[in-house]
């Protein structure tokens, strides 16, 4: 029996690090590198977006994957108002539930609980009035029964913000590092290293804002020959793969935000690569690639809910809560 599968952009170990840490990241397409608002889930992706907090803040997110896997994210930040150095500590934990343990003959010997987790310590500093830089150190670990894998990784990002014109630019080079321990102890395992850029634009006296992310820019051609080989792929031949436009749109994520109310926002996004990876030629692809959600800002709380479409009949929901540990008469920092 032969089984084959393909993904645009190749494969790497510890791909759980690509999972969105919060609903405010899932809703705009899975990537946020530039924004005009403060959010710990977004700052987890680009540490340059860490901002000084009036009060200590905590962020928690919950995402439930098909097959019984659950993703939990917890992050906290504390600093003095207008402090130069801002630090945050975050934990991402994925519990894959209980899985039967079998021998080569298929006999059940018991069960085990596969899990992945990553601890991140991040810090950011301003430079002049418009620039900010950030860096993060990660310790990631995967445990699947008797197999273990551990890596040390780093993220380095920048942010440029022009508040007068409502323009923000961000860039990140993430998941660069080395394996401390490999699953089989010997073979090479690639890490999900990625270079990405993003811009965000808000319009004065307008409820609308929009952004663009260029993801996985460390490699231009993200698709493979096998992906469009009709002998192994249900997608069939796709003449777009050899064109500049086809490769260009694989890197794009488009997002928008609409203020429905002073305390309620709609967030939406479209991930071209996600739709391309999960499209098939046997029927409708539905809303694959689209994502959207709502964020409500209260006195001490931010509540966000996102829905991301992966296939015609499969979507994921993510809930995030961020709150200030102390009351503030000035409301939530933006």
Image: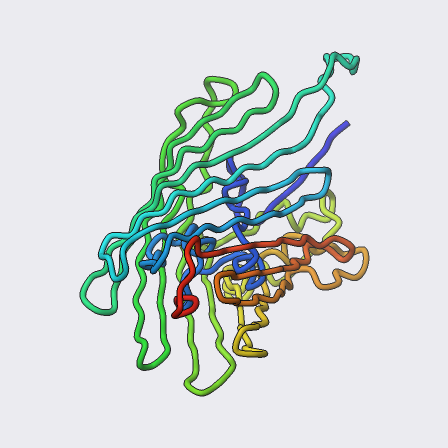
Left or right: 280 with respect to 301?
A: right
Is residue 279 something one can see in this rendering?
yes
**Residue located at (39% from left, 37% from top):** 138
The residue nearer to you, when weighing 317 against 246, is 317
Place of residue 68 in the rendered image (x, y in percent of width and height, measured from the top left): 71, 37
Image position of 219 with respect to 160: above or below? above
Out of 155 and 303, give the one closest to the viewer.
303
Q: Which corner quadrant of the image does residue 108 belong to?
A: top right
Q: Is residue 132 left or right of residue 128?
A: right
Q: Position of residue 97 (x, y in %)?
A: 68, 31
The N terminus, quarter of image:
top right
Residue 81 horizontal/vertical position (percent): 28, 60
Residue at the spot 71% in from the left edge and 25% down from the top edge: 99
Q: Residue at x 55, y 55 (%)?
A: 321
Which image quarter is the C terminus in?
bottom left
Instruction: Name the spot of residue 263 as percent of width and height, x first.
Output: 54, 73
Comparing 135 with 325, the one in front is 325
Q: Can residue 36 be seen from the camera position used here?
A: no
Q: Is residue 224 left or right of residue 165?
A: right
């Amino acid at each position: 029996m032969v089984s084959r599968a393909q993904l645009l952009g190749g494969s790497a170990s510890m791909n759980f690090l690509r999972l969105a840490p919060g609903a405010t990241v899932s809703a705009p397409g899975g990537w946020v590198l530039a924004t005009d608002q403060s959010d710990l889930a977004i700052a987890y992706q680009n540490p340059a977006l860490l901002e000084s907090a009036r009060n200590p803040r905590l962020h928690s997110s919950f995402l439930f994957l098909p097959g019984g896997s659950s993703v939990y994210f917890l992050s906290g930040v504390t600093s003095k108002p207008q402090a130069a150095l801002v630090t945050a500590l975050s934990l991402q934990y994925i519990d894959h539930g209980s899985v039967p343990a079998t021998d080569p003959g298929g006999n059940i010997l018991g069960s085990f609980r596969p899990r992945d987790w990553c601890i991140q310590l991040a810090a950011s500093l301003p430079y002049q009035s418009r620039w900010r830089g950030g860096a993060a150190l990660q310790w990631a670990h995967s445990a699947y029964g008797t197999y273990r894998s551990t890596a040390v990784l780093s993220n380095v990002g920048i942010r440029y913000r022009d508040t007068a014109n409502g323009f923000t630019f961000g860039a990140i080079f993430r998941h660069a590092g080395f394996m401390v321990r490999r699953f089989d102890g010997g073979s090479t395992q690639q890490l999900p290293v990625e270079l990405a850029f993003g811009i965000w634009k808000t319009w004065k006296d307008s409820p609308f804002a929009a952004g663009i992310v260029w993801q996985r820019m460390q490699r231009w051609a993200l698709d493979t020959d096998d992906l469009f080989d009709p002998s192994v792929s249900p997608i069939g031949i796709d003449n777009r793969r050899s064109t500049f436009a086809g490769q260009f749109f694989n890197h794009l994520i488009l997002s928008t935000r609409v203020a429905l109310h002073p305390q309620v926002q709609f967030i939406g996004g479209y991930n071209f690569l996600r739709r391309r990876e999960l499209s098939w030629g046997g029927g409708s692809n539905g809303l694959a690639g689209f994502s959207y959600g709502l964020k409500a800002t209260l006195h001490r709380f931010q509540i966000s809910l996102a829905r991301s479409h992966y296939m015609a009949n499969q979507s994921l929901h993510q809930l995030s809560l961020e709150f200030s540990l102390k009351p503030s008469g000035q409301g939530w920092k933006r």
